Image: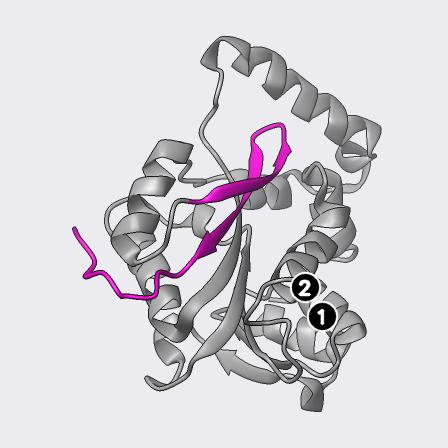
């Protein structure tokens, strides 16, 4: 099924701070010790329509980029936006990567929130860690569980007002909006820290927060840890 007209604009109107997320994510990885080197290999997980890839190609054309997404429609949109020969494209989930693929850094923006916390989130983080070189970093951005439950009604109202003021309600199909916001499996920062450590990462460092959207920088430990259930 083709993406709806204005899909990228709709996602930006839905997500506070989205316009800055690609630049922020790429800049953080570019400043890391591993991916700052010329020709670094960088993985974009759930590349969608290519927002992070677009910024990466502009700011670090020397990077060897690999983009993974299970949705062929998304990949087609990203290819059209970026160019077929500019990126290594992988249709599928992380398991579609070659076993010996190793990366200096990785990005996963608004991806893990769609996975249930029944082992799927841990497998997701563990797969990324396995494909990162020691001390490689991951920028992870997700819709998280409320930090302050007593303020959640106000935060939800603010999110709705943000969407209205951005023009979202006037132009987006309600079915599309439901598909973009339903089945979000939120976890707390404490739970994320536990999953990250089990997957072989150090404690997440928060680098972004806009309402319930949070971004974290995770670094792979130099010695791999066996994933726990």
What secondary structure is found at the residue carrying circle 2? helix
- Between 7 and 15, the residue placed more toward the observer is 15
Quadrant of residue 18 in the image? top right
Image quadrant occupied by the N terminus: bottom right
- Between 154 and 218, the residue placed more toward the observer is 218
- Please identify the residue farthest to the top as the structure is shown: 150
Residue 64, percent from left and from top: 61, 83
Quadrant of residue 48 in the image? bottom right
Q: Which residue is denoted by mark 1 in the rendering?
A: 56
Residue range in magenta is 204-229
43 in relation to 169, above or below: below
* Residue 49 appearing in the image: no
Q: Which residue is denoted by mark 2 in the rendering?
A: 52
Q: Is residue 106 left or right of residue 82?
A: left
Residue 175, percent from left and from top: 60, 42
68 in relation to 26, above or below: below
Quick check: is 221 in the magenta stretch?
Answer: yes
Residue 44, percent from left and from top: 56, 68
Find the distance from the CA under tag 2 to the CA under tag 1. 6 Å
């Amino acid at each position: 099924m083709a993406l709806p007209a204005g899909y990228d604009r709709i996602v930006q109107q839905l997500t506070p701070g989205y316009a800055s997320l690609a630049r922020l994510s790429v800049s953080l990885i570019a400043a890391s010790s591993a991916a700052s080197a010329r020709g670094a290999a960088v993985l974009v997980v759930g590349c969608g329509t290519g927002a992070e890839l677009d910024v990466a190609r502009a700011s670090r054309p020397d990077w060897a980029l690999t983009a993974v997404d299970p949705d062929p429609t998304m990949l087609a949109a990203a290819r059209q936006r970026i160019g077929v020969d500019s990126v290594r494209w992988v249709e599928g989930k992380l398991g579609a990567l070659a076993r010996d693929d190793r990366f200096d850094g990785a990005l996963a923006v608004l991806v893990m929130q769609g996975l249930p916390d029944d082992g799927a989130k841990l497998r997701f983080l563990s797969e990324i860690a396995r494909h990162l070189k020691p001390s490689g970093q991951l920028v992870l951005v997700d819709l998280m569980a409320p930090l302050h439950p007593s303020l959640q009604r106000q935060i939800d109202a603010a999110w709705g007002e943000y969407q209205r003021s951005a023009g979202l309600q006037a132009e987006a199909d309600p079915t599309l909006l439901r598909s973009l916001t339903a089945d979000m499996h939120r976890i707390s920062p404490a739970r994320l820290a536990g999953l990250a450590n089990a997957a072989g990462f150090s404690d997440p460092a928060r680098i972004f927060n806009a309402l319930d959207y949070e971004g974290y920088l995770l670094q792979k430990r130099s010695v791999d840890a066996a994933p726990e259930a």
